Image (tube, rainbow, N blue to C red):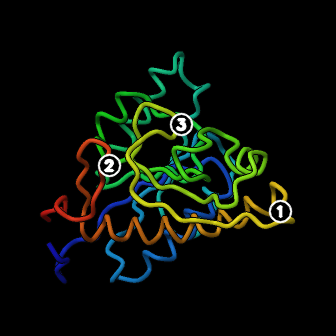
């Protein structure tokens, strides 16, 4: 269903752990009413990071939930889940969030949690995608946006973007070009999810059919 002028923007909660460059790209995109979304809260697993500062400068509510503040990982996951739920998100975006969200979190926001990975999944999962791509000698790598499941970078794929590997690339130069492409892919895909919704069938993801009714 196409977006209507009176449709409320999709509510995004963004979780960060660092500089928040993907978050900033989303904040900038949301400034255009036609984008169809707004960031209603930004959460983090640690204090004093630029991602939180970006949100505060934009007037967006922030929260911090540190694993060390809780007696178990399960209690942390429940606290994170309850805090995010209080903002009534249509979509939760993990934008450089360096903690795995547990089953209660994923069940609460079923098929509404998305994350990016700096490789073309299913290749090179985990923390070192650009380095492993370079070491393997691939000629093309890139970035993937996926629906988060309980695995590590294993969820159904929403979008991918390709990045050629140059002859003189090192890990830093390759990763930097991947991050630029990743930001654009994230902004484009999140906007489409906000306006059209997504439908997940097994491992197949398509835009449309899951549009919000409000």
In this view, the mark in front (2 or 1): 1
Local packing at callout 3 (Cα closer than 10 Å; few below 14, some 14-19, many 20+) is some
Q: Position of residue 57 (x, y in %)?
A: 59, 69
129 shown above or below 60: above
Number of marks in the rendered image: 3
Q: Position of residue 59 (x, y in %)?
A: 50, 68
Q: Image quadrant of residue 40?
A: bottom left
Q: Image quadrant of residue 169?
A: bottom right
Of labels 3 and 2, earlier in sequence is: 3
Q: Are marks 2 and 1 in contact (CB under 8 Å)?
A: no
49 shown above or below 2: above
Q: Could you say which disc has been placed on residue 146 in the image? A: none
In terms of secondary structure, where does tag 2 sit? loop
In terms of secondary structure, where does tag 1 sit? loop
Q: Position of residue 107 (x, y in %)?
A: 29, 33
Residue position for label 1: 169
**Horizontal side, residue 174 vs residue 71: left or right:** right
Residue at image location 66% in from the left, 63% down from the top = 178
The C terminus sits in image quarter: bottom left
Local packing at callout 1 (Cα closer than 10 Å; few below 14, some 14-19, many 20+) is few
Q: Residue furthest top?
A: 71
Of labels 1 and 3, earlier in sequence is: 3
Q: CA separation, marks 1 and 3?
A: 37 Å
134 shown above or below 6: above
Residue position for label 3: 65
The N terminus sits in image quarter: bottom left
Local packing at callout 2 (Cα closer than 10 Å; few below 14, some 14-19, many 20+) is some
Residue at image location 63% in from the left, 58% down from the top = 141
In this view, the mark in front (3 or 2): 2
Residue position for label 2: 112
Residue at image location 62% in from the left, 42% down from the top = 124
């Amino acid at each position: 269903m196409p977006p209507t002028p009176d449709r409320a923007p999709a509510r995004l909660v963004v979780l960060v752990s660092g500089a928040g460059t993907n978050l900033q790209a989303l904040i900038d995109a949301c400034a255009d009413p036609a984008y169809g979304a707004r960031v209603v809260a930004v959460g983090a697993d640690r204090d004093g990071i630029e991602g939180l500062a970006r949100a505060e400068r934009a007037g967006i509510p922030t929260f911090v939930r540190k694993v060390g503040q809780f007696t178990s990982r399960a209690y942390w996951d429940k606290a994170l889940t309850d805090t995010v739920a209080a903002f009534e998100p249509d979509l939760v975006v993990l934008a450089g969030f360096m903690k795995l969200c547990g089953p209660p979190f994923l069940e609460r926001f079923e098929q509404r949690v998305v994350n990016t990975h700096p490789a073309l999944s299913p290749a090179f999962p985990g923390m070192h995608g650009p380095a492993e791509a370079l070491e393997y000698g691939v000629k093309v790598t890139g970035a993937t946006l996926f629906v988060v499941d309980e695995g590590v970078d294993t969820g159904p794929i929403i979008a991918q973007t390709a990045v050629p590997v140059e002859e003189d690339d090192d890990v830093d130069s390759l990763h930097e070009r991947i991050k630029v492409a990743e930001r654009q892919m994230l902004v484009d895909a999140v906007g489409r999810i906000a306006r059209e919704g997504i439908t997940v069938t097994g491992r197949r993801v398509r835009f449309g059919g899951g549009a919000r009714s409000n």
